[in-house]
């Protein structure tokens, strides 16, 4: 047998997942999109930073015009909390959010579709203390570059083909 998925410890590919908690965060992108059903939603990319310098991206879709009132109210409340936390309670465009810094309250959950763990924004609070995301990203890049590079060698002679 070449491969058996039963022997694989699956990991989430492409991004880190943080434990539930509060993290300094910066909004990297925000744009209005239209769902397949025709409702407009706000797609926001947030980069969150742990105290040790690790970071993760959270992609939040806020259904601010959803036909179900409860869904709409939850999305609008989260957006209002973010806007107030970054000091911009009135937004002319979604792009007004970009660069905004706040404390993200994250939750960690297991996705029903693929079983992977993910983060979502549960709430937003104003930043307390110093928070410089540019400096944190630069420090993370330096530590990655300073890490010793390990050469990985595969023994292809054991492959069954």
Image: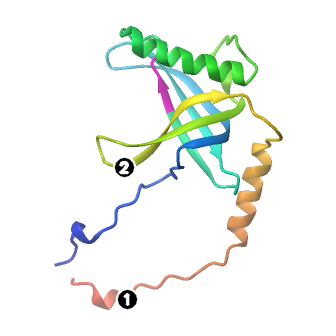
- The numbered dot on residue 17 is none
Determine if residue 119 is in view. yes
* Residue 141 coordinates in the image, percent (x, y): 71, 59
Q: Main secondary structure of the magenta part?
A: strand
Give the farthest residue toward the left.
1
| Above or below: residue 157 compared with residue 97 | below
Taking depth in this image into account, of 22 and 16 the one nearest to the observer is 22
Q: Does the magenta stretch include residue 103?
A: no
Give the farthest residue toward the right.
130
* Residue 35 coordinates in the image, percent (x, y): 38, 20
Give left or right: position of 11 versus 91: left
Give left or right: position of 94 versus 14: right
Part of the protein shown in magenta: 60-64
Q: Element under label 2? A: loop
Q: Whole-Å distance between the Cαs marked 2 and 1?
A: 30 Å
> Which residue is under mark 1?
155
> Which residue is under mark 2?
116
Q: Which of marks 2 and 1 is in front?
A: 2
Determine if residue 95 is in view. no
Question: Going from the N terminus, do you reach mark 2 or mark 1 first?
Answer: 2
For image coordinates 57% across by 34% down, the residue present is 45
* Residue 62 coordinates in the image, percent (x, y): 48, 22
Circle 1: is it few (<14), some (14-19), or many (20+) Cα within 10 Å? few
| Above or below: residue 90 compared with residue 104 | above
Circles 2 and 1, Cβ within 8 Å, touching? The answer is: no
Give the farthest residue toward the bottom.
157
* Residue 78 coordinates in the image, percent (x, y): 56, 21
For image coordinates 43% across by 55% down, the residue present is 13
Q: Element under label 1? A: loop
Q: Is residue 61 magenta?
A: yes
For image coordinates 73% across by 28% down, the residue present is 126
């Amino acid at each position: 047998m070449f491969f058996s998925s039963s022997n694989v410890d699956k990991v989430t590919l492409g991004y880190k997942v943080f434990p539930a908690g509060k993290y300094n965060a910066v909004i990297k992108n925000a744009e209005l999109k239209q769902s397949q059903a025709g409702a407009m939603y706000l797609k926001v990319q947030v980069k969150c930073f742990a105290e040790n310098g690790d970071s993760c991206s959270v992609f939040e879709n806020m259904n601010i015009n959803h036909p179900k009132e409860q869904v709409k109210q939850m999305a609008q409340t989260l957006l209002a909390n973010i806007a107030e936390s970054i000091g911009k309670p009135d937004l002319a465009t979604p792009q007004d959010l970009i660069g905004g810094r706040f404390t993200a309250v994250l939750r960690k959950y297991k996705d029903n579709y693929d079983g992977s763990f993910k983060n979502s924004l549960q709430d937003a609070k104003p930043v307390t203390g110093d928070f410089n995301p540019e400096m944190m990203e630069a420090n993370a890049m330096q530590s990655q570059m300073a890490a010793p590079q390990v050469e990985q060698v595969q023994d292809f002679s054991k492959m069954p083909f």
